[in-house]
Image (cartoon, rainbow, N blue to C red):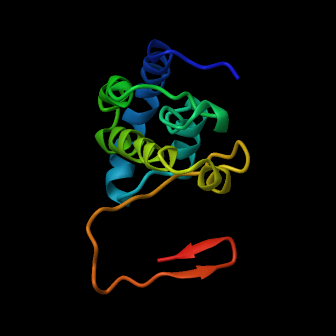
Amino acid sequence: MNIPTVDDLVARAEALVPYLKEEAAATESRRNLSTETMAKLHEAGFFRFFRPRAYGGYEMDWGTQYAYSKVLAHGCPSTAWIASVVGQHSCHVARFAKEAQDEVWPDDSDLLIATGSVPRANVKTERVEGGVKI
């Protein structure tokens, strides 16, 4: 796998800024990123910066997401937030035992990790085919 540098990721972010500027108002109106924008973020590798190399990631340091996200913010702050925050969640799984990482990353998919740290009394979880329903 060809591991990009931080400068490579920043250059990819710079290339996306014109597109993000065009999409920013629609993103804010929808209150979510479009499928096309998410595909562009995946294609650029912005969600792999913390994922271990053994699982198709870049295994980069803290601050990487800040370097490219501050550039993305010139196009769309909401997109920059998602690229940075959602991308960093893989660091939690990267701290799990190898067996857990094998289960989360069985292939080179573009799986996104969602985490939370505030327990809620009214949240229920159940195992369903293919994962967990929250």
Which is nearer the eye, 36 or 119?
Answer: 119
Q: Position of residue 77 (x, y in %)?
A: 29, 39
On the rendered structure, is 42 left or right of 79? right
Which is nearer the eye, 27 or 84?
Answer: 84
Residue 48's image quarter?
Answer: top right
Residue 120's image quarter?
Answer: bottom left
Q: How many marks?
A: 0
Q: Position of residue 126 (x, y in %)?
A: 54, 83
Name above or below for residue 28 compared with residue 79. below
Q: Position of residue 39 (x, y in %)?
A: 59, 43
On the rendered structure, is 130 left or right of 133? right
Q: Residue furthest right?
A: 107
Name above or below for residue 131 compared with residue 18. below
Identify the residue at horizontal 41%, vertical 35% (top origin). 20
Q: Position of residue 70 (x, y in %)?
A: 29, 27
On the rendered structure, is 70 left or right of 42? left
Identify the residue at horizontal 68%, vertical 46% (top origin). 109
Which is nearer the eye, 126 or 80?
Answer: 126
Name above or below for residue 50 compared with residue 90. above
Identify the residue at horizontal 53%, vertical 45% (top origin). 38
Q: Quadrant of the N terminus?
A: top right
